[in-house]
Image (cartoon, grey):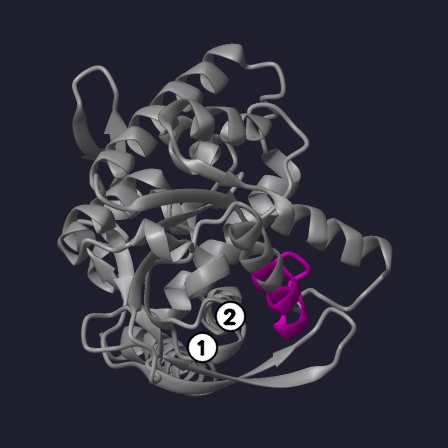
Amino acid sequence: MFRLILITLPLIIVIFVLEITLNFLKPTTYEKDDFLGWKLKKNFKHEFSNFTKKNKKYSTIFITNKDGNLEFNLNGSYEKTIKILIIGDSFSTDPLVSNEKFWYSVMSKKIAETNKINLNTTISGGGGYGTLQQLLISNKLKSLNPDIFILQFCINDFENNILDWEKRNYRFSQYFWRPYFDLDSKQIYYEKNIFKSILKPFKDSRLLSVLLSRTGILAEKYFSDPIQNDKEMFESSLKTTKYLLQKIFQNFPFSKKIILSCKQASNFPDTEWKKIGNEIGYIVLTENNKAIEGAMRENLDIFNIDGGHYNELGNKIFGEAIANEMEKKKLLNSSNF
């Protein structure tokens, strides 16, 4: 027994020190949730150090409110106040830039100044969220009855919405906790396996989250099962995603409903998001993707160090393009509100 203690004690100490260190250096903005899988912490505030892809350092002050949402309000002396609700994923809710430098803040500032209006913008969702999680969030927030509702879609949502797809790409840190939707039974379900049961007591561990993510990346690199021609998988994803997007749409009967994607799609079924959005009745915005592609052609430093998400400049370009397209489509005309 004493020998066992001597062997395990150093390991326990190392794990404890790593956990404390990770939470101190880069605390997670999320906590696990039995229903949503994970959600933003309430009343969270922290200053993060970030880097652009070209290794330029910048600081990020990330703040959530008492409801676990982000917000950006512009309350001036104008007579009219417009409420905007945005539901998205990591491109809207991860600590990549400070709250006031996110794309939605850039967008809000520009449309407020142009239209001489006050704006109350609420942002909800979570990094890695699929469409079902966004629907569950919208069920809670539909009582806000916003004037404008924006769904920030992402092309990887098609994968996020199908358990078998995520499992074949080893998304351990997501499919272990994420809820999924069965289109036939119209029921929500969760992944069940022995590893998840073993790890559940440690679900809020920062170290476990990092290990699951890194293990998944390595497994995807060496063992991922290509599904380029899996028509059945694609069809299931398209049908499920469209159904969930319709349900979100129906939650906001009195709002202007906009859908936009965080990235330009090039592969099927990712390219279908615009078609689905139009069929449901969303106002589909695409100029933001064109603006990002233009910045990439100019080799501008628009990405975070991870190479996928946008830094301050990327968010500025993204947000301004959205505001410009909203103006072009006359979505903020005073007669519409």
Q: Nearer the viewer, residue 33 or 225?
A: 33
State the residue at coordinates (25%, 30%). 181
> What residue is shown at x 37% (from left), y 19% (from top)?
239
Q: Count residues near mark 2 (Cα–Cα under 10 Å), then give few for <14, some for 14-19, many for 20+.
A: many
The amino acid type of the residue labelled 2 equals Phe
Q: Are marks 2 and 1 in contact (CB under 8 Å)?
A: yes
Is 156 situated left or right of 16 in this image? right
Is residue 180 among what the camera can see?
yes
Q: Work out which quarter of the rendered image holds the N terminus and state it.
A: bottom left
Look at label 1 and name its amino acid. Asn
Report the number of numbered marks.
2
Asked whether the viewer can see residue 178, the reply is no
252 to the left or right of 85: left
Numbered range of the magenta stretch: 306-319
Q: Left or right: where does residue 302 sit relative to residue 163? A: right
Relative to 214, is 235 above or below? above
In the image, residue 308 lies in the stretch drawn in magenta: yes
Q: Position of residue 240 (x, y in %)?
A: 34, 24
Q: Which residue carries the number 2 mark? A: 102
Which residue is disc 1 drawn over? 99
